[in-house]
Each structure stands twice: as structure tokens, then as C-alpha cells.
Image (cartoon, helix red, strand yellow):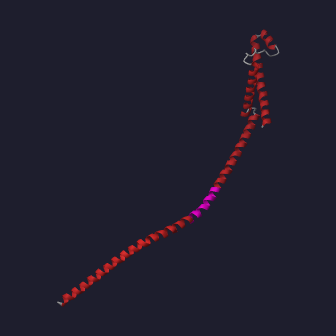
Amino acid sequence: MSTNSGEKVSDLQLSRVIKDSAHQIWLAGLGAYARAEAEGSKLFESLAKIGERLEKTAKERMTAPLRAAEDTVSGVRVTASDTWERLEKVFEARVARALHSLQIPTARDVKELTDRVEALQKAVDELTDGRTPPPARATGNGKGAKARKASPSKAKGATAKKTTRKAATRRKTSAKTTAKSGEAGA
């Protein structure tokens, strides 16, 4: 029986060794968990501080090139705006010269004429004071009446042509006067 009892003793010892070993492993796990819990928050905080420093350094490194790029873009924008304004002025001056050479009145000329007509209308209104204006007088050298007596159809055509020519001459003279006064005012 000694063989059996020797085997039982060794099984019993082996069982105790395994039990003690498992218990120690369990205690080591609990200790590791407690330590990780205690030092885990400290580790997390230290990692967060390191991350903040890295982020600050990265921002500082990126800020300088971004500012330089923004300055360059704003400088280009100002230069482009100035150039565009100069081009507009040159174009306007050339168009104004072309219109002047064609004797086409400008907006300023039309405005001045409008102001003058309004002033004249006001003066006429003040002079008439609500009275009806006198009938228009016939102007001319009297040739129109003689021509009408001789040949009414020819006289009307000749008079109409003279009137048209006179009106065209008056418009040209008025446009030249307006253009000259515009140049003097400019």
C-alpha cells in the first residue's frame, strides 16, 4: 500500500502547489489591476500633457506659413484691384475721347443741358406768371412768303429743307458749345 499512499501524497502536494500557484497568480492580477488603476490616471494625465505640448508646437509651426500666405494673398488682391481700377480709368478716358471726336454728347453734357433747360423753363414761368405766352412770331427773311405765292408745292419743300438744315446746324453748334464747356469744366 505504500505505493498507493506515496502517489496520494505526491498528488496532494502537487494539488497544493498548483492551488498556491493559482492563488499567487490571482493575487498578482489583482495587484496589477490596482496598480494600473492608480497609475493609469497619472499615465493618462502625463500623456495628455505631452499631447498638448505637441499640439502647441504644431500650431506654432503652421501659424507662420499661414500668416505669410494670407499676407501674400492680400497683397496680390490689392495689386489686382489697383490695376483693374487703372484699366477702367484708361478705358473710360479712351471712350470719352472717341465720343468727343464723334461729337456725341456725354452724360455730363446731357445733364448740363437738362439743367440749363430747367433753369430756362423756370425763368419763363416766372416771367409769364401764369399768363398765356404770346403767339409765336414768324422769323425769317420773307423769302418763304414770296416763294409760297409763286409755287406753293416748291416753296414748302425748299422751306422744309432750309428748316432741316438750320436745325442740324443748331444741333452741331450746340453740341460743340456743350463739349467745349464740358472740357473747360473737366
Question: Which residue: 72% across, 38% down?
Answer: 95
Which of the 4 quarters of the picture holds residue 128? top right
Question: Which residue: 78% across, 25% down?
Answer: 170
Question: Which residue: 51% across, 67% down?
Answer: 51
Query: Where's the C terminus, which quadrant?
Result: top right
Was residue 83 drawn as part of the magenta stretch in this picture? no
Q: Is 163 placed above or below 73 here?
A: above
Point out residue 48 in the picture as x, y percentages from the top left corner.
49, 67
User: Could you tell whether 49 is left or right of 76 in the image?
Assistant: left
Q: Nearer the viewer, residue 130 or 139?
A: 130
Q: Nearer the viewer, residue 132 or 69?
A: 132
Point out residue 31 in the picture as x, y percentages from the top left corner.
38, 76
**Which segment is the magenta one?**
57-71
Give the dominant element type of the magenta stretch: helix, strand or loop.
helix
User: Could you tell whether 130 is left or right of 34 in the image?
Assistant: right
Query: Where's the N terminus, which quadrant?
Result: bottom left
User: Could you tell whether 77 is left or right of 14 in the image?
Assistant: right
